[in-house]
Amino acid sequence: MTTIHVRGACPHDCPDTCAWTAQVDDGVVTGVHADRDHPITAGHLCVKMQRYEERTYHPDRLLAPLIRSGPKGAGAFREVSWTEALSAVRAGLEGAIERHGASSVLPFSYMGTMGELQGSSIDRRLFNALGAARMDGTICLSAGAWAWGLTYPNGWPATDIETVAEAELVVAWGANMVSTHLHFWPYFLQARKRGGTIVCIDPVRTKTARAADLHLAPRPGSDGALALGLLHVIFAEGLEDAEFLAERTIGADELRARAMEWPVARAARATGLSADGRGP
């Protein structure tokens, strides 16, 4: 048997982009192992990827196109060639455009396995050439990307997550770090070892909430009120970086005025938290 080890990276849509090594025995991947030397991966893969080879070679994995052969919902499909499948797609697109115009075609997709071809290239060129309708190709990223762009106007690169370990206060706001941010959580723990405090803001008592030094459980949907209450304290007690706000931001005065409308007592009523933030 010939065994080789191939270095690679996880193809899933996750900022960690874990580094791994695939063990290949006689041309077949028999295991995927996390890179222990990679500073973020640090020898650990999430449960979805620890047995990636099993999904790759699973007998139920689709390897050819299927076309429905019975009533919708009956689960009846037949295997066809790529030529027949692509011809059916083409016929559907041409029929829709002929009957209702190109804008009747609404592409909705996301990043696939994050490859350059699948993620952000060929599909957009195809639908642009067709004159199809345009929309954000995600149901989750747009709001965050908009806020991120305002915070980091020069692009996506931001603070290195390794610097979190040096923070005096780290906040997991609406994020179950222990369960879903496998490679981020250790930096929270390092911050705690250095004397920092971990705060979790989540209506649910998650694993992260239980592991945090302070858990704030606001009413669902009241995050905005909590944020305004925190801003009120910052501005009222002069804790803001006035020089930074003056030089680097737009709308700070308007934000201050808005925050002044939300004293702690009002924020507490809206969120269901007590004035000290420790419960109802």
Image: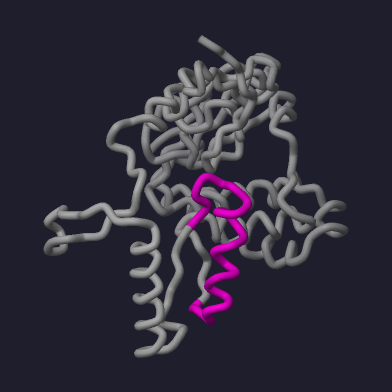
- Asked where in the image residue 62 lies, by quadrant, the reply is top left
Residue at position x 48%, y 23% in the image: 29
- Residue 182 appears left or right of 19: left
Determine whether 3 is above or below 266 in the image: above
Q: Report if residue 106 is visible in the image.
A: yes
Residue 127 part of the magenta segment: yes
- 106 or 193: nearer the viewer: 106
Residue 178 part of the magenta segment: no
- Asked where in the image residue 145 lies, by quadrant, the reply is bottom right
**Outermost residue, top direction?**
1
Q: Give the range drawn in magenta.
A: 110-133
Q: Report if residue 188 is visible in the image.
A: no
Could you say where residue 179 lies in the image, as x and y percent from the top left? 45, 28
Determine whether 105 is above or below 256 in the image: below
- Residue 61 appears left or right of 107: left
- 42 or 10: nearer the viewer: 10
Q: In which quarter of the image is the C terminus?
A: top left
- Residue 23 appears left or right of 239: left
Residue at position x 35%, y 90% in the image: 99
Determine whether 52 is above or below 130 in the image: above
Could you say where residue 168 lies in the image, as x and y percent from the top left? 70, 27
Could you say where residue 167 lies in the image, as x and y percent from the top left? 71, 28
Residue at position x 74%, y 46% in the image: 157
